[in-house]
Structure formats: C-alpha cells, structure tokens
Image (cartoon, rainbow, N blue to C red):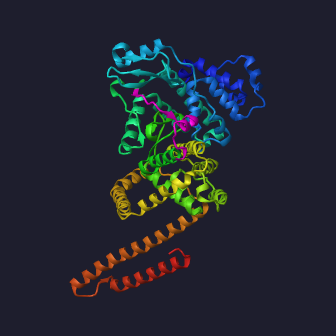
Amino acid sequence: MIGKRMRHIGRYHEITAALLRHGFGMIVDELGFSSFLSLPPRWRVEQGKKEGKTVGERLRLVLEELGPTFVKLGQIASTRPDLIPDHIIYELEKLQDQVPPFSFSDVRRIVETELGGPLEVLFRSFADTPLAAASLGQVHHAVLPSGQAVAVKVQRPHISARIETDLEILQDLAVMAERRLDWAASYRLSEIVDELAKSLRQELDYTIEARHAAAFAEQFAGDSLVYVPGVFWDYTTKTVLTMEYVEGIKLGEIERLKEEGYSLKALAERLTKTVLKQMFEHGFFHGDPHPGNVFVLSDGVLAFIDFGLMGRLRPNVRHHLSSLIIALMRQSTDGVLAAIYGLGLVPDEADEEKLRDDIDDLREKYYRVPFGEISLGEAVGDLLTVAFRHGIRIPSDLTLLGKALLTVEGVVEMLDPQLRIMDVAEPFGRKLLKDRLRPDRVAETAWRRVADYGEMLLRLPDSVKELAKIMRRGKLQLEMTASDLEAFLHKLDQISNRLSISIVLLSWSIVMAGMMIASSFGRQSMLLWKIPAVEIGLGVSAFLFGWLLYSIFRSGKF
C-alpha cells in the first residue's frame, strides 16, 4: 500500500489540496495525510476560505475540481439516497458532465487503432465537430460506406488509466477512513466505494452499453410505439461505440413538439407506460430517462438513447417491490415493513420499534391522499430515506429505480401537469398482484421452496461434518446473554441426568440379564458365597433407580 501511495503521491497532493481549499481540513487531519504528505503551510491557511457554504456545496466543488472520476462517482452516488443524506444528494444532482471536447486528431487515432483501418475507408464521412462531449467521451455524427447514418461515441484518451488510479486512491482512503473514523466503519465506506467503482468501470466498457441496447431492443421488439437504435458490432469495441443515428425531437423541446402538432398528454402517458413496463414487466429499465435521452419520432414513436446506466430487477426484488406497491396501495404498515425487510439488509442493531414509527409517519403522510395524487418516485424516495436513517442497505438497482421514477415524473409534469403517474401505475400494481396469485406461479414458488429445503437436507451431513471439524479444532464460538446461558445450563443438566439414568439402567440390565441367563442354564438360584445375587441385585437396582429418580425430580431439572 505504501508503494501505491508513493506511486500516486502527486494525485494524493491534488486531492488533499482540494479538500483543504473547500473546508475539509478536519478530514485531512483525521485520515492522517500528514504522515505521508508534506503539506505547505499556505494550504492550511486556505482551509476556511469557503465559509458560509453548506457541506453539500463544498463537496460538490471538490468533486468538480478533481475531474471526471469524481464527477461521475458523484453522479452515481446521487442515485443512492439509502447511502447518502438528502442535503448531499441535492448538491450531487447539480454536478455537470459538460467538459470541453478533445481534439479530432485524438479521435482519428483512437478510431483507426480500435477499428483497424483509415478513417476514410471505415466511414464515408465523419464529422470533425462532436455532437456532444462528456467527461468519459464524446459523440460524432458519421456515415457508413452503406450510406447508414450513425452516432460514434469515442472514449477520451487515457481516461481509463486515470480513473483506475483515482479508484485505487479512493479505495485506499475508504480503508483508512474505516480504521480511523467510527462513522466510516458503521457505513461500511469501502463497500460503498467498491459498489460505485463497479458502476463506473462498467461505463468505461462500451461493449456493455452495446449489449444493454441490444437487450433493451429485444424486449420492445413487438412494440410499434418504442424504437431502439441498432448497434453496429463491427464498428464497436471497448472504447468506440457505433449506433444508428436517431433524428427526432427531444422530449424536452416542448415548443417544437407543439409546433409539430404532437399531443403532449398522449406522449406523457406513452412515456409513463413504457417506463413502468420496463420496470415491472421486463425487470430491465433505462436508468436515466431524462428529456435529452428520449426522442419523439414520426407518429409519436418514442426512441431511447444512451444505455450506459441501466437497472435490472432480479425476480426476488420484483417480488418484494410488488409487495411494497401493494402495501402502499392498502396503506399497510406491516406490509411496508415486511417489504423493506425483504428488499434490504437490515443490520442487527436496527431498532424495529423506531423503524415502525417511521413507517407509520410515512403512512400518515399518504393517508387519505387520493391514489392518483401520490408520487410513486417520492414514495420510493421516502422509503429510501428511512432506510438510510436506520442503516438498511437496499439493492442499488432499486435505488436507481426510485431515481428513474422521479426523473420520469418530472418529465411527465412538464408535458402534462394533470397526469398522475400513480393513475397509470395502479394497473401495473394490480397485475403484479394477480401474477403472484396465479396457480402456476404459486405452484412454482412452492416447488422452488421444496427444492431448496431438499437441497438443504442433502447438504446436512456435510454441514455436520464441517461443524465437527470446527469443534475438534476448538474454533467454535458461541455468543449468549446471561438468560441464554442459564437456560442452556439448565437444559444441559436435564440431558446429563437423563443420560445418567439411561446408563445406570443399561448397566444393571446387562449385569442382571447375564446372571439370570446363567441361573436359567444351571436351573438353580444364582448364589455367590451362599447369597442370592440375582434377587439382591434386582433389589439394589430398584433402590438406585428410585434414589436417582428422586434426586433428579427434586432438583427440578429432569
């Protein structure tokens, strides 16, 4: 780790300078940066320059100053209200991804290297000026030799190496923070960084985005009102993505839509149904359906672009999500609570009574509110806020779903303020409930559980062997409270006393059986030193058994 720090010492200095410049000197001190960085005195003086700004504002300024990696991580983090407080989320949502474009000579070099040929041979034409530029790459209009118009996304030169360096540093800082700061350990900061880093690394691989687009197109293959641009795989690599060029009107261009005679109400309903279908029927949805990523084509067909941020709801998450929606519809605190437990990882230290109180507060907030006036995105957001308050980890795709719902609601409000997304969502919720109660679905669930229990029973001998090995090595750890220990010792006494009875009776039974068999063979009473041993033995057995039984019953531990 020391070697890595020395290798990236310059970047550590830049991060430290940005933190100090925006008033985070306390974090610099608590992380112990001075142990391996020599900080100029003037940096310490700059610590209070940003007084008057909120923590969220200062954090946003730090991320913007540190460049693409931190901006993208901030944007991804803004979708995680279960991990980050609301006032921080509010500022992270302001992070801008607009940066100056890189030179066309770099574009040419990257495209020719990746696709293996001169630009003039690969394309009939290729625009020098990009259509858009962002922190990870930029998009150019081009035409293939076949005459097909395409949009070519080209990754910024050396951005991958820089991001890997920054992620390595961030993971180091997260581990340092967990060792030194209680709050960082309680929030498992290194796990959060790992999760955000995974999302960012996926965005760096354009083949993943291409596969997302292909899967998205497949699930809408039979829908004439949704269009997904095709991927040209021969012109696509990890750093170059070539897709069909889409010409249309962005959903955000309200005046143009009106001029062209489109019904804004119909577009709002179509967008809502399309997004809800992605989420609740297919379980694979566009994670950033903002007005710039959705175009209106001829006849009101909606075209989606930019598939870098996608969400996938696994069957068990969709199951609990449907339970959550149904519980919200029925305003059931117990149902919402059960759904939260099913969806998230509830820590052992969570206070269930306080959690129930917070759920009751939410129920009161939505109590007697007309169903159509409830904001589904806000409801999910409120639940994620409660999850954050109680340290409950929620699947990242579910938080992305909440963010996407809020985005869609904003677009719908812009298109048709009278439309309520819950009016459109209610049939989906009822359909989810019907699907769960279908006989074949119930039978499938029951069979899966039987199979799970069967597999568990088959693994039981191996588990017992493993437990025995652990016990022989002396590595078995037990954690008990005082009441648990007393109950355990009481039970142990019961077991040992019952074993004592069994052993005594068995021993005497064996002895007496032997003597009686010997006596029967000799056809005479068994005498030892002229004493009737069998008769006396039976008497002694009866006495011992009676005395042992009396002692155990008297102790109350039988």
Q: Does the magenta segment cover residue 262?
A: yes
Where residue 254 appears, as percent x and y from the top left, is: 57, 37
- Residue occupying the point 46% across, 41% down: 300
Which range is magenta?
A: 242-265
The answer to whether residue 383 is visible is yes
Quarter in which the N terminus is drawn: top right
Q: Is residue 521 left or right of residue 265?
A: left
Can you say whether 554 is above or below 240 in the image?
A: below
Can you say whether 274 is above or below 165 in the image?
A: below
- Residue occupying the point 35% across, 28% down: 232
Q: Is residue 147 left or right of residue 277?
A: left
Splitting the image into 4 quarters, where does residue 207 fall? top left
- Residue occupying the point 65% across, 40% down: 182
Where residue 121 appears, as percent x and y from the top left, is: 33, 14
The answer to whether residue 237 is visible is no
Can you say whether 456 is above or below 305 in the image?
A: below
Q: Depth check: give the residue in front, 140 or 214.
A: 140
Badge count: 0
Where residue 179 appears, as percent x and y from the top left, is: 61, 35
- Residue occupying the point 67% across, 21% down: 17
Q: Is residue 268 left or right of residue 115?
A: right
